[in-house]
Image (cartoon, coloured by chain):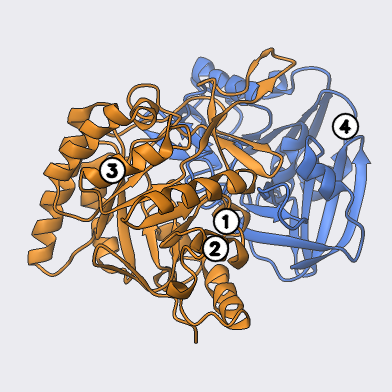
Chain colours: A orange, B blue
Amino acid sequence: MSDMTCSIAGVHFKNPIVMASGTFGFGREYGSLYDINRLGGICGKGLTLNPKEGNSGFRVYETPSGMLNSVGLENPGVTAFLREECEYWAGLNLARIANLGGNTLEDYVEGARLIEEDALLRKTSGKQAVDMIELNISCPNVKAGGLAYGIKTEIAREVVRKIRQATTLPLMIKLSPNAEDIVQMALMCQEEGADAVSLVNTFSAMKIDIHKRRSVFDNLYAGLSGPAIKPIALRMVHQVSKAVTIPVVGMGGIQSAEDILEYIMAGAAVVQVGTHNFVNLRAGADLIDELQILMEREKIESLDEIRGIV
Amino acid sequence: MAEVIANVEVAPNIFRLKAAGAFSGRMGQFYMVRAWDRYPLLSRPLSIFDLNESGIEFLYQVTGEGTRLLSALRPGDELQLEGPFGNGFPEVQAGARIALVGGGIGIAPLHYALRNYRGSDVYLGFSQNPYLTENFEAATTGKVLVNVGGIVLEQVDFHAYDTIISCGPEPMLKAVQRKKLETKSEADVYVSLENRMACGIGACLVCSVKCLDKRRKACADGPVFLAEEVVFE
C-alpha cells in the first residue's frame, strides 16, 4: 500500500483528499452516503460571525467544463455552528477545518475568537471538534469585505495578523485567484504567521442572459469553479509553492486521481475537492480508491517522493 | 446504473423516460439523473412520474444541454440515478377532499401522487399541446379538468377541498399562494418548487428558498412546502 498520509502544522491527514468549503455542508449530508471518515479532511461551509442569508436569484449556472455559483455565503453563523455541528464533528475521525469569512475586520476577529474559545474548552474535555481554521479572504460573491480583502495584499495583511493573534489553532489562509499578485499574497500570509495557504477560490466571472439583457445573477458576477479553472489554478499552486516554505493546499477542478498527482507534483501538500462533489456524490470515496491504485501503478511509495517535483 | 427501456416524445420537447430496476420513492420525491460522464457537470433533478416493480418513470421538458442529452437516450442505454431525495407530498387522512393542480411539466409528480390520492380531482393547465391527460383520467376516480392557454387556477374552488397540492411554473405557484390567502381557504395548500440544484442532498445551498421564518433547502427541506411559508422573490 502506498503511503498517502500528510501532516500540516501537526494536523494529520490520512490521505491528501480534503473536501472544499461550500461543497460539503458540514459533512452530514455526504455522511449518509459513504463513510466520510475515510477522507483526509473536510472544510466546513463558510461561516460568518452572524447568520447570513446569501444572495437572491439564480445561485448556479453551468458553463463549459465549469460552474458559476452565487450562493453568497449563506450560513448559520459561528455561534450556531459551534452549538449545532461541533458535537457531530467531535465524533469524526478526520481533519476538521472550520472555514471563516467576514465582512469587517471586527467580524473576522470575533468569529475566530469564538472558535478558539470553543476549541480550548473542548480540548480540555477531550472532545475537540475543530483542528484548523481556514480563513476565507477571497469569496467573490460577497460585496463588502470578501473579495476586497482577497485582492490587495496590504489590506489582507491586517486581517491575517489580527486573526493570527486571535487564535492558537493552526491557521490556513484561502487565497483568491483574483489577487493582484497571488505570490506576494502568500508570502505575506507566511510572514504573518499563517501555517498554510490554500488556493484557489473561485474566479470572479459572469454570464449574461441576452433575452433579458442582464446578468443571470442578481449579484452581477459569480464565482467560476470546476475543471475549466484547473490549468490556471495548477499554475498558481506551482508558483506559490516555489515561493513559500509553509504547506500549500491546492484546489481547482480536481476530478480524478491524475489531477491530484498533478497538484502534488506542482507542490501541494494536500488537495481540496469541491465542484466534483456535485458531479459524483461519492467522489471522496472513489478518489481515495483511485489514488491508491494510481500510486501503486506509478510505483509511488509515498506522496513525499513526488511533492513539488516539477 | 439503470437501463433505459423507453424514452418517448409525448409532445414537442416533452419526453417520458422509463428505466428498469428496483427503485423506491414516495410521491413528490425526486432523483438526480444523469446519462453522461462529466459534462455537463451537474445532474438534473427529476421528480418521479411513476414507479412500480418493473422500474421508474420520469417526465421532462428539454430546456438545456442536460435534458437534450437525456432526450437522445435509446432503449438499452445507461442512466445514472441517485435518490430518492426530498420530503415529498404529505400524507392525508382517509376521505380528505384533494385537488392536484399542475401547470405544464409540473404535472409530472402529480401523476405518481394519484397512486395514493386515488379520489383526487385533477386540474391540468397547459400553454399549448396538452399531454398525457388520459393517464391522469385513468389514475383517478375524481374529475380531471384540462385547460389550454388559460388559467387553470380559476377553475379550482379553494373551499371545496381539504388539501390542495400544486406544481408548475413559479407564476402559477405564486397565484396559488395568493388565492389561498385571498379566499381565506381552510385547505392545507402545498406548492412543489422546481429550483436549480447542484448537489440535491442539502450541502451546496444553491436551491435555497426564502421562507417566512428562515431560508430552507428546496432539495432536502422541500421541494414541497406549505404555500403560505414561501416568500417568492
- The 10 Å Cα crowd at callout 2, few under 14, some 14 to 19, many 20 or more, is many
Q: Amino acid at mark 3?
A: Cys
Given the image, on which type of amino acid does mark 1 rest?
Ile
State whether discs 1 and 3 lie on one chain: yes
Q: Do the numbered discs 4 and 3 sit on residues whose CB atoms are within 8 Å?
A: no
Question: Mark 2 touching mark 1, by CB under 8 A?
Answer: yes
Q: Measure the alpha-carbon separation of dots 4 and 3.
A: 62 Å
Answer left or right for A299 relative to A198.
Answer: right
Name the residue that disc number 2 marks. A260
**Type of amino acid at the residue the image marks with label 2:** Ile
Residue name at image x 32 percent, y 72 percent = A93
The local crowd at label 1, few if under 14, some if 14 to 19, many if 20 or more residues have their Cα within 10 Å, is many
- Determine the image quadrant of residue A111: top left
Q: Which mark is residue B130?
A: 4
Horizontally, is A270 left or right of B98 in the view? left
Name the side, left or right, on which B220 lies relative to B194: left
Tell me the element at label 2.
Answer: helix
**Lower sequence index among marks 2 and 1:** 1
Whether residue B93 is visible? no
Q: Residue at x 38, y 47 (%)?
A: A45
What is the chain letter for disc 3?
A
The numbered mark at residue A254 is 1
Q: Which image quarter: residue B2?
A: bottom right
Residue B196 rendering spot, x and y as whole percentages:
61, 37
- Measure the C-alpha gap from mark 2 to mark 4: 50 Å
Image quarter of the N terminus of chain B: bottom right
Q: Position of residue B47 (x, y in %)?
A: 68, 48
